[in-house]
Image (cartoon, helix red, strand yellow):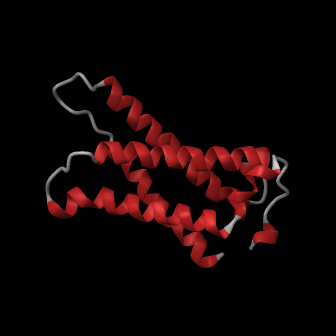
Amino acid sequence: AQDDRPVARGPRSFAFVDSVCFSVSCALVVAFNLIVMAWPLVFKHEVAGLHVLDCIFLAWYVMELACKGVYYRQALLFGRCDFVWWNWLDLLIVLGGLAEMIVGLMHAADDVPVGLPYLRALRILRVVKCSQLCFA
């Protein structure tokens, strides 16, 4: 479905965001992220370092969205629904992750950890994003 994409108006150096290699890399990051998210649920204990991995995943998602934004410009979020809805989903997930991180940093000094599980649950929507590869 590469020819169904809107015309990119950004620098050609960002054309890699349309490549199969980039899409597969993104899907692998999502899969690893889901494994890391499920780890404490499956093994019933918190593992040190998962917060660092969460930050790395969030940085990847921000970078992915930013690169697509540079390449597609306004066509990233405004255009044919079958293309832009995936990007709106990505934006929702990234904003939820950033909100979760900001709230976590604001309450880092508190003795009681403040979690926003519904924001973290937004990352599970990445599975839906992975399905895009299967049907593309």
Percent coordinates x, y for residue 80 in the rendering: 77, 60
Q: Is residue 103 left or right of residue 87?
A: left
Nearer to us in this view, 53 or 44 = 53
Residue at (46% x, 37% y) in the render: 98
**Location of residue 55 by image quarter:** top left
Can you say which quadrant of the picture contains the N terminus?
A: bottom right
Examine the rendered structure and indicate whether residue 119 appears above or below residue 36: above
Residue at (25% x, 60% y) in the render: 39
Can you say which quadrant of the picture contains the C terminus?
A: bottom right
Which residue sits furthest bottom? 135
Examine the rendered structure and indicate whether residue 33 appears above or below residue 109: below
Q: Is residue 117 left or right of residue 15?
A: left
**Location of residue 15 by image quarter:** bottom right
Residue at (44% x, 35% y) in the render: 99
Percent coordinates x, y for residue 90 in the rendering: 57, 52
Nearer to us in this view, 38 or 120 = 38
Percent coordinates x, y for residue 82 in the rendering: 71, 64
Q: Is residue 37 left or right of residue 7?
A: left
Total labels drawn: 0
Residue 127 appears in the figure: yes
Q: Is residue 42 left or right of residue 16?
A: left
**Location of residue 112 by image quarter:** top left
Percent coordinates x, y for residue 74 in the rendering: 78, 44
Residue 118 appears in the figure: no
